[in-house]
Image (cartoon, coloured by chain):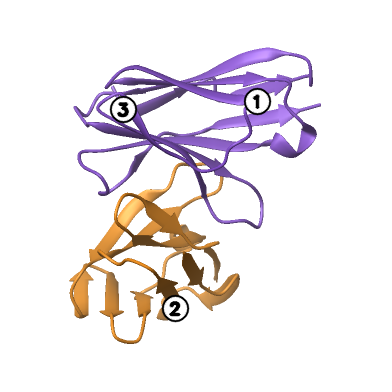
Chain colours: A orange, B purple
């Protein structure tokens, strides 16, 4: 089975840096995705890690440690539009399994 | 056209009604999915179709009936639903199993 854990809510201020953690216990692992979902909208792809290490894409970076079953999403220079839910999803043999998502609120 | 299109965006139905949700993807993908998203719960996979064949059915009640007539279209037929079935139903597609999911905007269902 799959178990994915991430914090329910986080708050941060505009211009700051925030790290959203995700831990997982899975029976099969073929990579980890991060998605962003604004209220009332579809989730959109942010990043994908299959090997250990850091993947950087502009203001967003994602890190993976397969031995620890751990990933994080790092958001730099936060903007108000970054207020959204961030979903961690583990790729198994045939499907993706999602965590509950972390609701990030960015305040001025 | 957007990649994955869902209709209707909002649906209100009684427990005795029969309705259908429609999903269409314009990405040339081979796999399509139905997910359910309820408040405070993770996205729940309902059905997976690959090349028009159902490859996964996660113990979904029979009042939800999927149909995949071709690789671009996916339906979710709804019959005698319960109030607890009220949720956002998201359709997604991928080029391969499993891969990066491309989601539609979702159909917000309310069962009275």
Relative to A36, B63 lies left or right: right
Viewer-proximal residue, A81 or B28?
A: B28
Query: Label 3, label 2: how many angstroms apart (C-alpha)?
Result: 31 Å
Mark 1 vs mark 3: which is more N-terminal?
A: 3
Give the crowd class for mark 1: few <14, some 14-19, many >=20 residues within 10 Å: some
Query: Label 1, label 3: how many angstroms apart (C-alpha)?
Result: 29 Å
Q: Which chain is indicated by disc 3?
A: B
Give the crowd class for mark 2: few <14, some 14-19, many >=20 residues within 10 Å: some
| Whole-percent x, y for residue B63 in the image | 65, 25
Q: Secondary structure at mark 1?
A: loop
Q: Which residue is mark 1?
A: B63
Q: Which residue is mark 3?
A: B2
Q: Quadrant of the C terminus of chain A?
A: bottom right
- Asked if the residue at tag 2 contacts the one at tag 1, i.e. Cβ–Cβ closer than 8 Å, the answer is no
Q: Secondary structure at mark 2?
A: strand
Q: Which residue is mark 2?
A: A21
């Amino acid at each position: 089975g799959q178990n994915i854990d991430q914090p329910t809510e986080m708050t941060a201020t505009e211009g700051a840096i925030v790290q959203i953690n995700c831990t997982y216990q899975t029976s099969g692992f073929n990579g980890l995705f991060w998605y962003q979902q604004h209220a009332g909208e579809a989730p959109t792809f942010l990043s994908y890690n299959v090997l250990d290490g850091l993947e950087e894409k502009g203001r967003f970076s994602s890190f993976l440690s397969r031995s620890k079953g751990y990933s994080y999403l790092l958001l730099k220079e936060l903007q108000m539009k970054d207020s959204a839910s961030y979903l961690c999803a583990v790729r198994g043999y045939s499907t993706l399994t999602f965590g509950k998502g972390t609701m990030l609120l960015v305040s001025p | 056209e957007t990649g994955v299109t869902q209709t209707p965006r909002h649906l209100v139905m009684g427990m005795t009604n029969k309705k259908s949700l429609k999903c269409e993807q314009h990405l040339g993908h081979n796999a399509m999915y139905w997910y359910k998203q309820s408040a405070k719960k993770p996205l729940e996979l309902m059905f997976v179709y690959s090349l028009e064949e159902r490859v996964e059915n996660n113990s979904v009640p029979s009042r939800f009936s999927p149909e995949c007539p071709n690789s671009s279209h996916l339906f979710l037929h709804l019959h005698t639903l319960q109030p607890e079935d009220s949720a956002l139903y998201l359709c997604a597609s991928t080029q391969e199993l499993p891969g990066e999911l491309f989601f539609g905007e979702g159909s917000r269902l309310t069962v009275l």
